[in-house]
Amino acid sequence: MVFKRKLDCLSVGFDFPNVPRAPRSCRRKVLNKRTDDADQICAIDLLALAGKLLQESESSSASSNAFEEIKQEQEDKYKPFKCESSDKGNSVSRPAYENTSEKCVVNSFSFPDNDDILERTPMSDNKKIHGLTPVGCDVNVNTGFQQGVATGGLGDGGLITDTCNVEDATSLGVQFPKSVCVDGDLKSPSYMDMTPNDSFARHGNHTNLGRRDDDEKLYSYHKLSNKFKPYRSPTIRRIRKSLSSKYWKQVPKDIGHSRADVGVKALYRKRKSCYGYNAWQRETIYKRRKSSERSSVVTSDGGLSSGSVSKLPEKGDAVKLSIKSFRIPELFIEVPQTATVGSLKRTVMEAVSVLLSGGIRVGVLVQGKKVRDDRKTLSQSGISCEENLSNLGFTLEPGPSKVHVPLCCEDPVVPTNPANSSERSAASPMLESEIPHADDVINPGNIVDNNLELVPYQSDMSVDEPSSDSRALVPLPALALEVKALDIAPLNQKPKRTELAQRRTRRPFSVTEVEALVHAVEELGTGRWRDVKLRAFENADHRTYVDLKDKWKTLVHTASISPQQRRGEPVPQELLDRVLRAYGYWSQRQGKHQARGAPKDPDMKRGEALGSGVSV
DNA sequence: ATTAGGG
DNA sequence: CCCTAAT
């Protein structure tokens, strides 16, 4: 309708080609503020939360809210973080990458089992540096280097060598800023006090609370983290990247040639600010490459190994157990032989962060079997003080944990605003069809993405209807939301481990978007994607002009095939018709252009059809 | 950085 | 969507 109207109004000497191009200066530079730090922080948050939970469990203070505490800690923890980079196992110092590299495989991180580590890292010190709360402790990387060696075929032999000797062969001593915090005041930091009907349930509650109440603070927290650019660690990007199955395959080769980054580079080359999370990720990879930094980390995808558990003195009905270690998916780490221990630490930290930020969840194994029903009580699951807890295992698995979601919902508005979702479905049923993509909807956490994706356009629809102004198609405010939201979406939902850093998440064009695209092309033609982007998708950062071009390409194709052969959410025939018309028009025009002004092509009454472009 | 096309 | 080549 809107379009019809437009079409009708400019039958008069419409001179398509003369649509002024937006000045280059208008190019929108989207500064993606996400940083590795943010990511790291996210991971840290998780760890912190885990620590808190443990802590809480231990103290049996059912009333305290671990999440609450954590969130507070986080509010200022990074101020100090920024200061002096003590060698306290922080990831602040910049690594000095050089030529040769070492590959290490980290398979498990174990929580401190005694005060040893705590001693090495004075609480006060830790607190000061990391602004952490009372709980300061390091995660001792009890790397499963044995495994690393086993997988050593990957590397060029440089596995763990030098660097690994720096400290104990069994412990790389990677210290997390304060990630997992086992209360130092407690004797047994890693205790986990679980009461059959309570513990797990409680955790669940925390989770929910976090989601509901902490979004905002966490959000600001994330923003805060942006201040730490100086400590940006491109490694994470690469790590993420490497997580992708596709590139993972390349790892062996790359590593072998000490050029792991090359393959990565090309991939992200020119995508800077356009894809939110993925964008910063890639951008950094790129930059990193340029700075010839050379450490890289890769994780094998699978690797959910169970951690070891041991039974602890029980008291009453409670089940006590200590988790000595969590195996994590293999992490292949490559650092220059000349790299400093500090850089190695950092690299590992980054690797872990990536892993965690991608979303992790804890799995419980009893007798080697996974207990999937979270509602089961421990006893029902065969976990009790009577049982030999050696049968109990925990796994860290890729994928968003319930806890993870809230941690990453930086944007307190979009993702959590129920109004949006309801508004959406009510306002534009059409959009419902775009929710589906299994690719994107991986779990409940996806609500965020869906909303993000839909909300904006939904509103744009409403705005669009009343006005024929093409600009209305993409209302800034609405898209602003989207952009913002999208920026974080990946974190919440792309739990697919391997896919994590791989391709950008698939984001099928909504009908609304298609509409906007078609409209823009009608006006601008098919050779000015940048302009199309600027005009109709300027605020849709996840749509690059290349995307638009590609979409157009597929649209043309779609329009030329039978409806039966089309897939995905159906595009209104009306739009497809316009696509063909515009396509025909512009194609022809291209040829005749040289010859003379506006051509007359039989395909469309160009005068009217494409005329919509006159507007603006 | 864009555009055009192939994959 | 990705990647390359050519602008």
Image: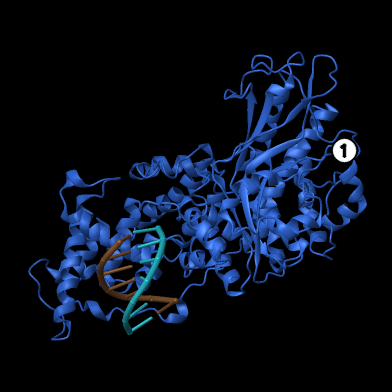
Chain colours: A blue, B brown, C cyan
Residue A512 vs residue A210: left or right?
A: left
Disc 1 residue crowd, few under 14, some 14–19, many 20+, Cα 10 Å: few
- Measured as percent of width and height from the top left, residue A393 is found at 68, 28
Residue A142 vs residue A368: left or right?
A: right
Q: Residue A263: in sight, yes or no?
A: yes
Residue A492 vs residue A73: left or right?
A: left
Outermost residue, bottom direction?
A595
Q: Which residue is drawn at 48% across and 69% down?
A: A269
Q: Which residue is drawn at 64% across and 39% down?
A: A211
The image quadrant where one finds the C terminus of chain A is bottom left
Measured along the vertical axis of the image, is residue A388 above or below residue A430?
A: above
Q: Residue A484: in sight, yes or no?
A: no
Q: Residue at x 25, y 60 (%)?
A: A3
Measured along the vertical axis of the image, is residue A31 above or below residue A394?
A: below
Q: Nearer the viewer, residue A495 or A539?
A: A495
Measured along the vertical axis of the image, is residue A29 above or below residue A438?
A: below
Q: Nearer the viewer, residue A4 or A189?
A: A189
- Measured as percent of width and height from the top left, residue A59 is found at 85, 29
Q: Which of A512 and A460 is in front in this view?
A: A512
Label 1 resides on the chain identified as: A
Find residue A523 and report its image quarter.
Answer: bottom left
Dot 1: what SS? loop
Residue A271 vs residue A140: left or right?
A: left
Q: What residue type is labelled 1?
A: Asn
Q: Name the residue under label 1.
A: A114
Measured along the vertical axis of the image, is residue A523 above or below residue A39?
A: below
The image quadrant where one finds the N terminus of chain A is bottom left
Outermost residue, left direction?
A602
Say how many tags the image has.
Answer: 1
- Measured as percent of width and height from the top left, residue A554 is found at 26, 58
- Measured as percent of width and height from the top left, residue A198 is found at 73, 21
